[in-house]
C-alpha cells in the first residue's frame, strides 16, 4: 500500500537555504559560512514557528537545506547543523506534523550560481551526494517519520543521468532502511512534463514529486533572479484576459495580439498545464505523487496570489493530490520572496489565504 502520510503542507525556506544571495559574492567567498550565517541559522526558526504552521491545519512541513550548509568539506559534516535538523524534526513530532528533509541546493546544482562543475558530470560530486544522504540516514535511522527528498529542482533535462544518480542514492538508503519514505522529483526543475521520464520503482514508500509555477511570468513577476520576469518587468493580475508573453521577440516587435481568445491566464490554462502530472498519477496508483512546491512572489497583489493558489489547490484536491505550498517566510536576501506570513508577526497574510491553503476555499 502506498504511503498516504502527506496531504497538505507548507515549505520552509530562508533558514538553511536562500539565506543570502550567494551570486553577489566573489567566487572565493561563496562556499564559506560566516558568523552572521550561523547566528541566522541558530535563531531564524523556532519551535513556535512549527507550532504555528501546524495550527493552520497542515500535516507536513518541508524544510529546505543546502549541501554547503551541512557539509563542511567532502565527508565532513557540521554537527551544529545536524543539531538544528534534529530540532526541526523533534518540533514536528511535538506538533504532530510529518517532517520532510529536502536537499534544496546540492553542490553542482545551484539555481542561483554559475556552475563550474555540474553534479551529473562529476563522479566526485556524485559520491559526495550519495555519502551525504547515507550520513543523513544514519543520523535519523531510529526515527521512521522524516521523509528524505533527494534533490530540489534539478537543472536541465538529463533524465538518464539523474535516474542513475537517484537510483544509487536510493539504493544506499535502502541498504540500511527498507521503509524510509524517499522522494524523487523530475528534471527541468521538477516540471510535471518530465515526470514520465523518471525510473519506476516497485516501492510503496517511494514518492514522486513535481513543482508548479505556471505561468512563470506571473508567479515570479518582476523577480530579480531569473531573466524572463526581469526582462518582462510587468505587474500581472490573476485571472486575466491577457496571457503572459511566451515569445519575447513578440514583445520587442509589440505584437500585442499574439494569443488566441483561449490563451488567457485562468484555470483553463492551469488545467491544461497540470494534466501531465495527473496523468502520471493515474498510471502510478501504488505510489504517492506529491505537488511539493508552488507559490507566487510576495510583491504580487495579495488578491491575485490568493486567486492563483485557490485555482491550483482546487485542481489538486479534485485529483486527490497531496500538496505543499511555498513558502512560510523568506529573508530580505532572497531575491524571490514567496513568504505567506508577515515578517514581524509571523502570522498568515489573510484569513482567505489561510482558508485557501487549508483547501477550504
Image (cartoon, grey):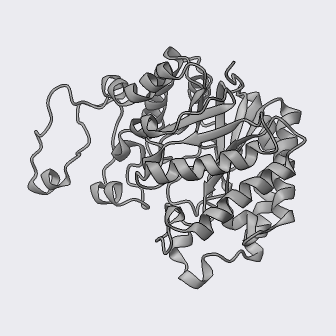
Q: Looking at the figure, which quarter contains the C terminus?
A: top right
Residue 277's image quarter? top left
Residue 120 appears left or right of 193: right
Residue 127's image quarter? bottom right
Residue 267, image x and y in percent? Answer: 35, 24
Residue 280, image x and y in percent? Answer: 46, 26
Residue appearing at x 76%, y 29% in the figure: 55
Residue appearing at x 59%, y 17% in the figure: 360
Residue 302 appears left or right of 353: left
Q: Is residue 343 visible?
A: no
Residue 309 appears left or right of 19: left
Residue 323's image quarter? top right
Up-down relation of residue 78 to residue 271 (above or below): below
Q: Is residue 143 visible?
A: yes
Q: Nearer the viewer, residue 36 or 104?
A: 104
Up-down relation of residue 157 to residue 22 (above or below): above
Residue 306, image x and y in percent? Answer: 49, 31
- Count of number-bearing discs: 0
Residue appearing at x 48%, y 70% in the figure: 115
Q: Looking at the figure, which quarter contains the N terminus?
A: top right
Residue 131 appears left or right of 246: right
Residue 7, image x and y in percent? Answer: 65, 24
Up-down relation of residue 202 to residue 142 (above or below): above
Residue appearing at x 71%, y 65% in the figure: 69
Amino acid at each position: 500500500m502506498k504511503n498516504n502520510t502527506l496531504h497538505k503542507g507548507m515549505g520552509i525556506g530562508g533558514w538553511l537555504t536562500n539565506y543570502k544571495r550567494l551570486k553577489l559574492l566573489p567566487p572565493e567567498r561563496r562556499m564559506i559560512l560566516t558568523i552572521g550565517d550561523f547566528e541566522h541559522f541558530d535563531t531564524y526558526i523556532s519551535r513556535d514557528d512549527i507550532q504555528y504552521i501546524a495550527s493552520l491545519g497542515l500535516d507536513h512541513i518541508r524544510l529546505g537545506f543546502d549541501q554547503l550548509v551541512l557539509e563542511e568539506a567532502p565527508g565532513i559534516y557540521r554537527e551544529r547543523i545536524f543539531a538544528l535538523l534534529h530540532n526541526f524534526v523533534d518540533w514536528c513530532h511535538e506538533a504532530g506534523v510529518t517532517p520532510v528533509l529536502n536537499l534544496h541546493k546540492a553542490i553542482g546544482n545551484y539555481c542561483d550560481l554559475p556552475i563550474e562543475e555540474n553534479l551529473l558530470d562529476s563522479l566526485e560530486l556524485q559520491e559526495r551526494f550519495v555519502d551525504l544522504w547515507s550520513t543523513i540516514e544514519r543520523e535519523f535511522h531510529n526515527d521512521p517519520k522524516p521523509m528524505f527528498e533527494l534533490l530540489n529542482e534539478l537543472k536541465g533535462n538529463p533524465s538518464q543521468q539523474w535516474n542513475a544518480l537517484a537510483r544509487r542514492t536510493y539504493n544506499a538508503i535502502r541498504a540500511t532502511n527498507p521503509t524510509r519514505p524517499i522522494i524523487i522529483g523530475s528534471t527541468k526543475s521538477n516540471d510535471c512534463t518530465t515526470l514520465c521520464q523518471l525510473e519506476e520503482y516497485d516501492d510503496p514508500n517511494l514518492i514522486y514529486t513535481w513543482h508548479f509555477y505556471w505561468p512563470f511570468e506571473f508567479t515570479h513577476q518582476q523577480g530579480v533572479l531569473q531573466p524572463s520576469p526581469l526582462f518582462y518587468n510587468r505587474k500581472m493580475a490573476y485571472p486575466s484576459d491577457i496571457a503572459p508573453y511566451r515569445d519575447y521577440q513578440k514583445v520587442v516587435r509589440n505584437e500585442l495580439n499574439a494569443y488566441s481568445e483561449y490563451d488567457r491566464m485562468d484555470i483553463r490554462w492551469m488545467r491544461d498545464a497540470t494534466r501531465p502530472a495527473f496523468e502520471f498519477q493515474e498510471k502510478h496508483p501504488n505510489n504517492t505523487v506529491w505537488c511539493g512546491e508552488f507559490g507566487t512572489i510576495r510583491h504580487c497583489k495579495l488578491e491575485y496570489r490568493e486567486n492563483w493558489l485557490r485555482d491550483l489547490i482546487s485542481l489538486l484536491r479534485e485529483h486527490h493530490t497531496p500538496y505543499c505550498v511555498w513558502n512560510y517566510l523568506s529573508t530580505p536576501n532572497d531575491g524571490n520572496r514567496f513568504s505567506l506570513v508577515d515578517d514581524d508577526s509571523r502570522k498568515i497574510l489573510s484569513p482567505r489565504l489561510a482558508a485557501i491553503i487549508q483547501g477550504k476555499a
